[in-house]
């Protein structure tokens, strides 16, 4: 892997996991030393992050990690609703039922992961569901559009990561989506997706507003 790709992956992961918090200045000297690379591949990595919208130029400060505002959250979910409901319909129509029946078995066991605080395993399961839905949707344009949103959506997970009751509810909501897709029911899959995203948005907005009040 090229140095610029390693730097991009490391910085992207640090931003998504909030190890580099919104407003953090990404100084070239500091980051090149931290990552053990020269400034040229670092600049290539920063350019990709700028294109992703994860960093932005701020007058006189260089590049900083972008903030996540309440308005941003609402707009992201507005677009996400439209894209993911259609992906759910397409997946129910075109997907292999056995793939989703297997995922349903795993989502029935997901509460056990969350009760053990094994969030990494739970999010890995969600990522596999996303990949299965994308593959089954048979629409590359839809998939490209929703994948452009996912880095920003992953950042939002950090807001609700400590809310285990919400995560348990989300696991049940994912199970309903998977079961609807496995059954080939287009509108039920879309409806279950709508409910899940509405509940997720409500929870994230409530938590974000609470955090801003206490700052």
Image (cartoon, rainbow, N blue to C red):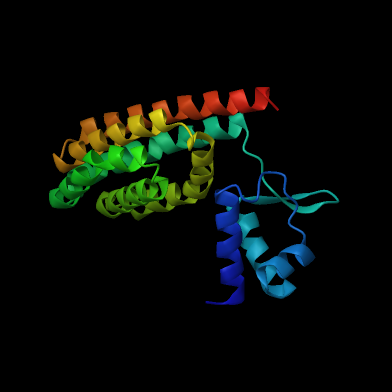
Which quadrant holds residue 68?
A: top right
Q: Left of 115 or right of it: where is 90?
A: left
Residue 157 x, y percent position in the rendering? 49, 40
In this view, 154 is above or below 82:
below
Residue 189 x, y percent position in the rendering? 24, 35
Q: Left of 129 or right of it: where is 185?
A: left
In this view, 17 is above or below 167:
below
| Total number of numbered discs in the rendering | 0
Residue reaching furthest right? 60
Residue 150 x, y percent position in the rendering? 47, 48
Which quadrant holds residue 210?
A: top right
Residue at 17 percent of width and 49 percent of height: 102
Q: Nearer the viewer, residue 112 or 43?
A: 112
Q: Nearer the viewer, residue 93 or 128?
A: 128
Which quadrant of the figure contains the C terminus?
A: top right
Residue at 34 percent of width and 49 percent of height: 130
Residue 116 x, y percent position in the rendering? 36, 42
In this view, 29 is above or below 23:
below
Residue at 62 percent of width and 57 percent of height: 49
Q: Left of 204 or right of it: where is 49?
A: right
Residue at 41 percent of width and 50 percent of height: 120
């Amino acid at each position: 892997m090229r140095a610029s790709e390693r730097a991009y992956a490391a910085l992207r992961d640090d931003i998504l996991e909030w190890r580099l918090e919104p407003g953090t200045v990404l100084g070239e000297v500091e980051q090149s030393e931290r990552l053990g690379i020269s400034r040229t591949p670092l600049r290539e990595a920063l350019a990709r992050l700028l294109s992703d919208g994860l960093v932005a130029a701020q007058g006189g400060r260089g590049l900083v990690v972008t903030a996540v505002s309440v308005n941003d959250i609402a707009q992201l979910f507005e677009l996400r609703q439209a894209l993911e409901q259609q992906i759910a319909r397409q997946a129910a129509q075109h997907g292999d039922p056995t793939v989703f029946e297997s995922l349903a078995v795993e989502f029935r066991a997901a509460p056990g992961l969350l009760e053990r605080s094994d969030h990494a395993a739970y999010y890995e399961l969600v990522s596999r569901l996303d990949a299965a839905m994308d593959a089954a949707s048979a629409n590359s344009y839809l998939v490209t559009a929703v994948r452009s949103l996912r880095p920003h959506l992953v950042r939002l997970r950090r807001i609700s990561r400590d809310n285990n009751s919400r995560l348990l509810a989300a696991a049940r909501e994912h199970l309903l989506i998977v079961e609807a897709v496995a059954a080939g029911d287009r509108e039920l899959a879309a409806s279950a997706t709508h409910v899940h995203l509405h509940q997720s948005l409500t929870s994230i907005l409530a938590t974000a507003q609470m955090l801003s009040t206490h700052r």
